[in-house]
Image (spheres, rainbow, N blue to C red):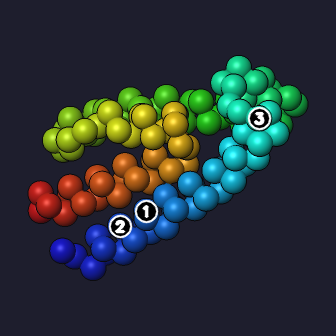
Amino acid sequence: MQQSTIKLQFIYAIFALAGIVLTMYYNLQFVLQYQGFSLTTFINDVYINFASSSIGNDLMVIWAVFILWSFIEARRLKISNWWIYPLLSCTVAVAFAIPVFLLMRERRLAEIN
């Protein structure tokens, strides 16, 4: 395996770790604040002001593009269990799912080469 591929996999792993740590802290705070999880309340809170609305809409577009692109890329590279990445993006965080997909994609590319 090429050194650049190993470095890139490491970088994706670091981003995945950051994506889960930086989002789960606030997700847990949300659950504690409302004594449970409510998708309706979560979405309403995203649109609490113009700044958060902008970021929320930005993330929704990124999420939609990621789902489409990752599906096409998974088929092209024959990456199994593609459904895991959209599931992770909805249940954990988009900031976690995208780097994990990129890590697995990089591993698959190294395997092919």
The answer to whether 53 appears left or right of 89 in the picture is: right
The quarter of the picture where residue 75 lies is top left
Reply above or below: 103 against 6: above
Spot occupied by residue 63 in the image (x, y as percentages of width and height): 52, 34
Q: Are marks 1 and 2 in contact (CB under 8 Å)?
A: yes
Relative horizontal placement of residue 45, taking residue 73 as reference (left or right) = right
Is 104 situated left or right of 32 in this image? left
Q: CA distance from mark 3 to mark 1?
A: 33 Å
Question: In this figure, which residue is indicated by the disc labeled 2?
Answer: 9
At numbered mark 1, what does the secondary structure look like: helix, strand or loop? helix
Q: Which residue, given by chain and number where applicable, does mark 1 sit on?
A: 12
Front residue of 73 and 14? 14
Quadrant of the image containing the N terminus: bottom left
User: Quick one: SS at disc 2?
Assistant: helix
What crowding class fits label 1: few (fewer than 14 Cα within 10 Å), some (14-19), or many (20 or more)? many
* Secondary structure of the residue carrying numbered label 3: loop
For badge 3, the amino acid type reads Gln
